[in-house]
Amino acid sequence: MAAGLALVGAADAGTEAGARTDGAARTDGAARTEGDARADEARAIEGLIGTGDFREALSRCAKAYAMPLGRLCMAFTGSQAESEELVQETLLAAFDAFPQYRAEGSVRAWLFGIARRLCGRHTELRARREARLRLVHDTRPRPDASELAVERERAERARAALSRLKPSEREAVVLRFEADLSFKEVAIACGIDEAAARKRVSRALSRLRAELGEE
């Protein structure tokens, strides 16, 4: 999951570069087609919101964005059940906010901004609740690292590294790589300008690389 955020590297160039040219062109074409379809869907949803057809807009939002919203919430919470609940809360909050939507950026970035705020509030409340429970009595079994699978161990290390980031940096890097938002969309979701969004993501990646590289 998040380990990939910190361990991103460039692919090696070699003698096969020429042979890959046609494949790369086809991949670029497919990516453009997918991007066009996504843009068309976003415009359709914005049109529905503009005309006041909020129920249909919500239905289209759920179909188009429920899965990426789920990945985002999962990255923040680490819980499938909690992420599913947060996706539902995000969509319901969006429905309530449709009358105030002004299309000042993509509808996707707007939705992820709502999810970011809900996840932040949820994780903060959960941390407080767990802290109170520990004051009474902590009966949770401690994990035995030797019994964990390699992938699970890497995910836990990465999640721990993410948790040590500043909240603003953690949100920016998760939105950028888990939600696959552009820097402009990250800026919209976080309520900052694009340059600040790039700086937050860059700082977060540097700190993740340093922490994971030390372990």
Image (spheres, grey):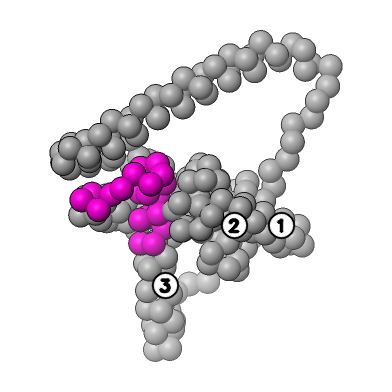
Across and down, in percent, residue 75 comes to 48, 54
- Of 70 and 110, which appears nearest the observer? 110
Residue span colored magenta: 98-118
- Amino acid carrying label 1: it is Ser
Q: How many marks?
A: 3
Tag 3 residue: 124
Q: Relative to 158, is 87 on the left or the right?
A: left
- Say few, some or many: other residues with alpha carbon within 10 Å of mark 1 (under 14 / 14 to 19 / 20 or more): few
Image quarter of residue 105: top left
Front residue of this view, candidates 156 and 67: 67
**Residue 33 locus on image (x, y percent):** 46, 20
Q: Quadrant of residue 132?
A: bottom left
Q: CA separation, marks 3 and 1?
A: 25 Å
Residue 63 part of the magenta segment? no
Compared to residue 56, the image places residue 167 above or below, namely below
Viewer-nearest of discs 3 and 1: 1
Q: Which of pointers 2 and 1 indicates the residue nearer the eye?
A: 2
To which residue does mark 2 refer?
Answer: 196
Q: Residue at x 47, y 57 (%)?
A: 190
Q: Residue 136: where, in percent of width, then height?
A: 39, 89
- Type of amino acid at the residue the image marks with label 3: Glu
